[in-house]
Image (cartoon, helix red, strand yellow):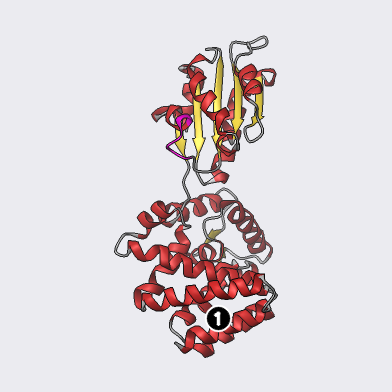
Amino acid sequence: MAYLLISLFADLLMHYFFYGEDSYSIVKKTAEFRRAFVEKNSDFNLTELEGEKITYEKYWNSVNSLPFLGDKRLIIIKNIFQNPNKEIRAEISKTLEKILKENVVLFVDTVMPDKRESLFKKMPKEKTAFYFGPLYGAKLSAWIDQKIAGLGEIKITPVAKSKLILYVGGDLWRLENEISKLYFLAVSLDKKEIDDNLVENNVEADLEIKAFALNDALVRQDTKTALTSMENLLKNGEEELRLFNLIVYQFRTMIILSDLTGEPSSKIASETKLNPFVVSKTLPLFRRFDLNKIYTGYRNLGKLDIEIKTGRIEPKMALFRAVVDFCRR
């Protein structure tokens, strides 16, 4: 990124492209890019467009307007790959080379574009294209350390950091908020570090994480533990339908991952586009147990889903049926 800001003023390159699943980093780097441009030029020559709604005429007029009292204009186009009109992207791909040389265009997309599209193939490469993928493992751990160090002297223990990652996953937006909360709680309690008790008592684990105990019990066909886990989740305010849908999702994820056994979890996450934390938690489940039972359970969940949607069964009863029926097999 340091090179990026230098090249913006030195090489005056025409096109830039930020994309990927990590919306947090994309938003932050886009703001940094914008700020650096405005400091060098002025906000008179800054235009930001919502790519999801843009028309080709709006795009063309924007990228071919001369700077006002300056040498360069910056046009930021957000989420062009989320525009439902593919013809607009096709037209843009034909005209990228025709943009006025006085204009710098930054394309920003917070989803992973279809690499087969002509516009993606025409997008900048190498020095002016930046992919922001989800953080996990050592990179996520380092990111948390950096965020905490930026707040002050207090550190986080390794156990607390592991628990924080387990509870929140790789959602950097939420992690930033949780880190700030934990830091100032530690300060108010005159603690020298954020420990695991502070995390456990003040950070709400995602339902997906909390439900893994239930899913693990199901796969092991442990009826008592599965029912207890389910009851605890419901008593703590989880919605029956949401919990049922999550169980369906977790079973579907196990089936998707079954074709990639033996591969590193990082590679599996990249190929399937699944959350790396979901992959790391799900892999041990079906590696230990009979995959045929998982297929059978998934089919039965599908039948129960139809019964819920047609009003033949209440979601809570469907949950009980799913647990009891699966554990009985």
Does any portion of residue 5 appear in the rendered image? no
- The region drawn magenta spans 114-119
Percent x, y of residue 109: 55, 38
Q: Is residue 279 visible?
A: yes
Crowding at dot 1, Cα within 10 Å, few <14 / some 14-19 / many 20+, comes out as: many
Looking at the picture, how far across and down is residue 268, in whole percent? 37, 57
Which secondary structure, mark 1? Answer: helix
Q: Is residue 269 magenta?
A: no
* Front residue of this view, candidates 294 and 28: 294
Q: Residue at x 63, y 75 (%)?
A: 307
| Residue under pointer 1 | 322
User: Is 117 in the magenta?
Assistant: yes
Q: Quadrant for residue 179, please give it.
A: bottom right
**Amino acid bearing label 1:** Ala
Report which quarter residue 104 is drawn in: top right
Q: Position of residue 86 (x, y in %)?
A: 55, 33
Q: Answer above or below: position of 154 versus 31.
A: below
